[in-house]
Image: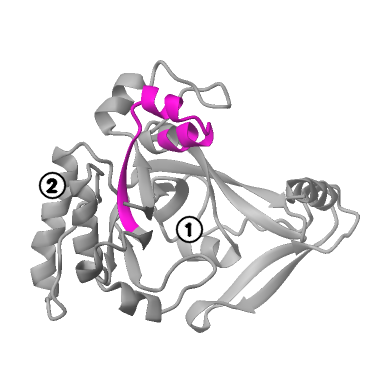
Amino acid sequence: MDSRCFIRLYSKKSDFERLKDTLVGSDGKPYRNARNLAAGSIRCLDANICKEREISFFAFNILEGMEEFEDIRDNLSNMLLSLSEYGFGICPFLLVSPNESAEGIEPKIKTLTDLAEISDIPIDGMVLRFDSFSYSASLGRTGHHYNDGIAFKFEDDTYETVFRSIEWQTGRSGEIAPVAVFDTVEIDGCEVSRASLHNLTFIKGLELHPGCRILVSKRNMIIPHVEENLDRGNYQDMTPQTCPCCGQPTRIHSRAGDKGRIVETLHCDNPECGSRILQKFVHSQKRKP
């Protein structure tokens, strides 16, 4: 049987707890969560390392091959079940009928989340996709993903902490990025004390001020994010009038955002700004030859 599949690598939660104190990443520090352990292991490009670290995988899509299964070749679910007969682990799934109601889908979501818990599989969401390969192919794709499915992430857990200040970082384009600084909080085994605030509009929307209580999360178990301000009503404008690097005057730029919203960003227009020059150099060194 010849086939080419998409697979998902993961470290079981129990395996991670057992191994986390004995392994370190490329930075010399222990892995903080199971996702990082799986990602760091596959980057080693050594199957023996993955085996030693007990990294697991399952197939969740079939790209080509398995031509001998012509009678079921157009059904992803049947093809995955056929893979399991050859000893492959497959992504747990349940079929949903086209006329299924939201109320009917909810028990199936619970069934899959319960199965993940019982099977010791880390999970942060669900994917809905079409079962027909031919119909999926007719929907096309972008440069990033196919258009035959929708991913739904579970709501992230939030943690209360205290907002202290904003660090302003000038990038190579001149846009000055705001970064929230708050009292350190542990999320998924990681100490988090900073998160992007995106733009001036986002800051105003949260009505941030030093000393306010905020809720932070790690979206998709990766990216720190300020979700809410628990002490609204005392907004304090912390926008710097000069660039934090070169000291030249800053400029506020307004542009159209999603759903007609106006988004304001802060900029440094000085082409000789040291931070802009440095970031341009760093960016140039990241380019592939």
Kindly give the residue lying farthest to the top in the view shown: 22
Q: Position of residue 156 (x, y in %)?
A: 32, 51
Q: Earlier in the sequence, mark 1 or mark 2?
A: 2
Q: Is residue 275 visible?
A: yes
Q: Position of residue 185 (x, y in %)?
A: 41, 35
Instruction: Check disc 1 and report the residue beneath it.
Output: 234
The answer to whether 60 appears left or right of 44 in the picture is left
Instruction: Check disc 2 and report the residue beneath it.
Output: 114
The answer to whether 96 appears left or right of 69 in the picture is left
Question: Looking at the image, which residue is at 46% across and 51% down?
Answer: 225
Front one among 82 and 225: 82
Disc 2 is placed on an element classified as: helix
Disc 1 is placed on an element classified as: loop
Q: Position of residue 256 (x, y in %)?
A: 59, 80
Amino acid type indicated by mark 1 = Asn
Question: Looking at the image, which residue is at 71% across and 56% down?
Answer: 240
Q: Position of residue 230 (x, y in %)?
A: 37, 53
Q: Is residue 183 above or below residue 108?
A: above
